[in-house]
């Protein structure tokens, strides 16, 4: 049985054969200039078609050629590249964000090789990277990553710079209908419907809503609002506009919103909050003003963040599948690298279901 040069290099008794660009050019029937352009990801005035690119890389892999440049290694063997989470700069700190930290945890747990690194890089949504290639996030610019998770609004120049290299992109919690992108989202509308169904089933009819920022165009907030409306319609109960408060999904906003909501008449007997942080603020306000949760008012959150089971009372909430999104993203990128499409695939959207997590913060009204 013959050994490839890559396998031969692993045996101390067999000298490794040095593979040159001339060898690759001869085997693939492509000029050395074109090969140099591909391996160094530079134009050099030579136009190289996608078909030629695939032919050269296939030849290199079959010959066991391993470039010295890490960037060339990643282009030729994309499965060796890093996993990179690209985050829009307006999203804040992903590590501190309860939802995205769970996504990252799920991705790291699902990695087939625990030693494989994962990087996080920011980008500006309004930056045109076509004009300023030097401003690309470092894992993209230096070519050390080959698997991308993406969070935030679409920056087409950034997405296209990745897709043209044949690398997979998974959009997390946003629907990006762009060729080469797979969008993974929680079913936000279903989450809100489940929350409404639970509160109505307990017997509540005076239900307040603490929503996101007024007029927000963020997909999660829009879909949660849609689910709330559907839940009220299914129950045959009118949604009273005076029982809706708006905020930035923080605990401080939840605290302030409760002061507004409880000052109205009739007072609500239950509150659905668009985040667990909002729910924490709502509970804090109620307890600091002599109210008992859930005896005097029920509070239901959304997210199932890690702290939700540790507060008092333990928070009833809707589980948004953050860890599941992270693990599914890893499966999607690995499947892409095993069987890459010849051209950027049509955009796909996968919606993962939510589920209600019943704890102690909700009960029937008095």
Image (tube, rainbow, N blue to C red):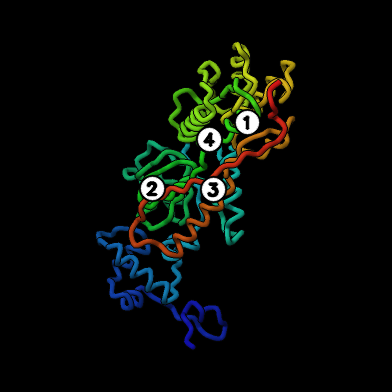
Identity of the residue drawn at 50% across and 25% down: 213
Nearer to us of marks 2 and 1 is 1
Q: Toward the viewer: 25 or 358? A: 358
Q: Which residue is mark 3?
A: 325
Q: Earlier in the sequence, mark 1 or mark 4?
A: 4
Q: Which residue is mark 2?
A: 159
Q: Is 220 displayed left or right of 156 in the figure?
A: right
Q: Toward the viewer: 231 or 163? A: 231
Give SS at disc 4. loop
Identity of the residue drawn at 38% across and 71% down: 58
Nearer to us of marks 1 and 3 is 1
Asked whether disc 2 touches disc 1, contact meaning CB atoms under 8 Å apart, the reply is: no
Q: Which mark is residue 201?
A: 1
Q: Which mark is residue 109?
A: none
For mark 4, does the 10 Å Cα neighbourhood hold few (<14), some (14 to 19), or many (20 or more) residues? few
Q: Is 228 displayed left or right of 359 in the figure?
A: left
**Residue 188: % across, % down:** 51, 37
């Amino acid at each position: 049985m013959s050994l490839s040069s890559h396998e031969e290099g692993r045996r101390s008794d067999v000298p490794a054969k040095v593979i040159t660009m001339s060898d690759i050019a001869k085997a693939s029937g492509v000029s050395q200039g074109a090969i140099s352009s591909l391996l160094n990801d530079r134009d050099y005035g030579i136009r190289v078609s996608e078909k030629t690119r695939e032919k050269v890389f296939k030849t290199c892999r079959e010959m066991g050629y391993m470039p010295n440049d890490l960037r060339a290694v990643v282009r030729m063997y994309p499965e060796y590249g890093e996993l990179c989470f690209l985050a829009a700069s307006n999203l804040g700190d992903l590590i501190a964000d309860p939802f995205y930290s769970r996504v990252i945890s799920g991705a790291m747990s699902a990695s087939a090789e625990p030693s494989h690194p994962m990087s996080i890089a920011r980008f500006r949504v309004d930056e045109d990277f076509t004009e300023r290639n030097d401003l690309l996030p470092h894992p993209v610019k230096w070519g050390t990553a080959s698997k991308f998770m993406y969070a935030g609004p679409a920056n087409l120049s950034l997405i296209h710079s990745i897709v043209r290299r044949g690398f997979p992109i998974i959009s997390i919690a946003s629907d990006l209908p762009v060729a080469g992108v797979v969008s993974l989202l929680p079913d936000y509308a279903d989450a809100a419907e489940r929350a409404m169904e639970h509160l109505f089933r307990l017997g509540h009819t005076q239900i307040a809503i603490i929503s996101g920022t007024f007029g927000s165009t963020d997909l999660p907030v829009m879909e949660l609002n849609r689910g709330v409306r559907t839940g009220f319609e299914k129950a045959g109960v009118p949604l009273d506009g005076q029982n809706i408060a708006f905020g930035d999904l923080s605990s401080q906003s939840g605290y302030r919103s409760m002061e507004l909501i409880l000052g109205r008449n009739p007072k609500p007997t239950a509150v659905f909050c668009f985040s667990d942080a909002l729910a924490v603020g709502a509970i804090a306000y109620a307890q600091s003003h002599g109210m008992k949760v859930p005896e005097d008012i029920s509070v239901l959150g959304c997210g199932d963040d890690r702290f939700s089971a540790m507060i008092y009372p333990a928070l009833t909430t809707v589980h948004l599948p953050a860890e599941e999104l992270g693990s599914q993203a890893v499966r999607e990128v690995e499947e892409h690298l095993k069987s890459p499409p010849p051209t950027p695939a049509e955009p796909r959207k996968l919606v993962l279901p939510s589920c209600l997590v019943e704890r102690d913060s909700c009960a029937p009204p008095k």
